[in-house]
Amino acid sequence: MRHFFTFLTFLCILGTGMAGAQDGTDTQFGIIPDSLFRMPAPSGDSAAPYLITNKEVDVSFRQTNGNIIAVLEHHMRLKVFDASAREASMVTIPYYYDENMEQISGLRGLTHLPSGKEVSLDPETIKTIDINGRYKVKEFEMPAVRDGAVLEYRYVISRRYIEELPDFYLNQRVPTAHARVSITYPQYLRYEGVVENFDGPLQHTFAYRDTSSVPKIFTLPRPEPVVTERWVARDIPPVQEEAYISSLDDYRGKIKFILKAFGLPRQQLDISWAVVVAKLRRNTNPLTEIRDYGRARALGDSIASAHPGEAPQQIQDRIFSFVNDQARFSGSYAPYSSRSDTEVLSGQAVDQAAINQTLLAMLRGAGIEAHPLLTSTRSSGRINRDFPSFYQFNALAVQSKIEGQTYLMDASFAYSQPNLLPVEINNGEGLLLREDSFTWIPMRAENSRVDIQVQVDGQLQADGTLRGEVVSFQRGYPAQLIRQQKANGRSDAEVLRRTLFDGYGQIRLNDVTIREFESYSGPVEVRGQFEIENYAASFTDGLRFRPMVVGYQRENPFKDTSRDLPITLTAPEQLEVHYNIELPRGFEAENTTQGNELNFPGAHFQESYAVERGTLSYDYKIDIERQNFAVDQFEQLYALYERWVELSNSYWMIER
């Protein structure tokens, strides 16, 4: 990790001051060793505003009204070095509240000041925020935080769903001195712990406690001892947020827990995706839900019947456009919904799953083969197929097949089209659910890309004015943005300005037309005349101007020149810009033809120049074919963008 040695130095500075708190002995809420107040602040580029000294979770179980409840007791302790960093004092605790799965109780917080004063968290300041249809968070700010303070809070989560436990994250955004999770088992269950993304030392032990009062005589039966399984890690480096990643959680060290044995006597459980899908079919099955979507099926059938001469792909486009126009997305993602098709078609705010279940029912009503596709949003992280769990899914798309061609769709994505997925779900994998089988497919769709082609034919004037014609063909996300702007009432000229000439204050646009923006069969065409005054600066010996009129990239999207995490771009990207610029009379440039290329797996950059008879002809082609790049490709990807930025900010001088 970057700054790793600085981090180790910081831990060494702590010396024996942390030993008493981190030797494996469980900490007690409210009792702070003096060594924490004496702890020096770290120094260097990697200095964090606070340190997590203890992160602890103790899991036990109780039976209530015939139900087994997992009880997770959390305790977090932090040492603050820089109180001006708000993240040191802000706390958010997520929990799964849908169907009353998890409840939070016993939330307490204390700020311990170096003076010895303690300030308690006021329960009235704790907010409950609804994140989506399934998750809420408790949010609060620790009181009276000062440099050198020690903060701690504790809470209990009671969880009804015991087939798996919440992930225990080892890496945080700041260093962690000591992290521990323990599970005290009843006789009738055991979990399997799966460690991900963590190659540091992890102590894994079992403790056995004899609770029997029966004398230790071999002829007398004795109950099994109570077993506590424990995982402990120390001196854990942070995982820093970087630009263009899927989700930070994809790279944080964690322990996942899945139920592996249950019953008396304990029986080993089948842990597989087949079991997950079987339960899904019984309890949260989109295919079962759409059986009640009679109105949607009838609408799909009527659309197909009203256009008997059209190809199935055209019928699909009509159905997608209809649902996309009618539906109102609430912003909540889900893999399944109990909301009705009537709610969707009447324009009520509904979740993504309800919208796509309606699309699915309408496509099937029109006789088009279509199936639900369960996946995970980018912010929730990629699906780990080694850990079978329904709760890795939090989004739903639709797959259709027409004459051997596959389409992925999300009708909740406004102004979208078939094979154009929102960025939230355009990477990773999805589970395609059929009536009698399932399979995994990549969440890659043909139109889920940035695809812009531009032709600029211009005339540079002696006074520095640049005028000419621009023609652009745009597909994928740029086309979706154009449709959105048109729907919002923007004029064609304003759309062109925002699309290609953003940043030009003094520009006149005339005869602007935008075509094919309502069609899914081809690119959106943008065409218009432009005039930019003072585009070139006039000097006694010539004109100075930027050659990249449109398609420029002023800054490198990667701010740092080094990288720790793999790269996940927003989407594949293709930009082709062709220029023909006529020079004014009396100005000349040396006739030349030259070019340059930069290639590596997954990306290509090409530039070419030809100057002849008073005309500058030059082309730029940037083709980033995929989203995902390994860390060892970062330097090449950075160099590609850096060259793009260099060309965007460069000037040419044309002599008189």
Image: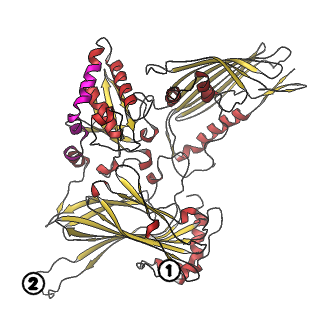
Indicate which disc residue 220 carries: 2
Left or right, 614 with reference to 297 = right
Image coordinates of residue 343 in percent, x first then y, are 30, 36
Q: Which residue is mark 1?
A: 19
The residue sitting at the right extreme is: 540
Image coordinates of residue 531 in percent, x first then y, are 72, 20
Q: Quadrant of residue 514?
A: top right
Vertical comparison of 505 with 423: above or below: above
Secondary structure under the numbered disc 2 in the rendered image:
loop
Residue 75 visible at all: no
Indicate which disc residue 401 carries: none
Q: Magenta span covers which residues?
A: 281-303
Vertical comparison of 309 with 80: above or below: above
Q: Residue at x 57, y 50 (%)?
A: 563
- Name the quadrant of the N terminus: bottom right
Considering depth in this image, is 326 or 179 the residue closer to the camera? 326
Q: Residue at x 29, y 73 (%)?
A: 228
Q: Main secondary structure of the magenta part?
A: helix
Q: Quadrant of residue 636?
A: top right
Between marks 2 and 1, how big is the CA–CA gap? 44 Å
> For the residue marked with disc 2, what is the amino acid?
Leu
Left or right, 397 with reference to 110 = left
Image coordinates of residue 413 in percent, x first then y, are 42, 34
- Name the quadrant of the C terminus: top right
Q: Earlier in the sequence, mark 2 or mark 1?
A: 1
Considering depth in this image, is 453 or 104 the residue closer to the camera? 104
Left or right, 353 with reference to 472 = left
Image coordinates of residue 304 in percent, x first then y, are 28, 18
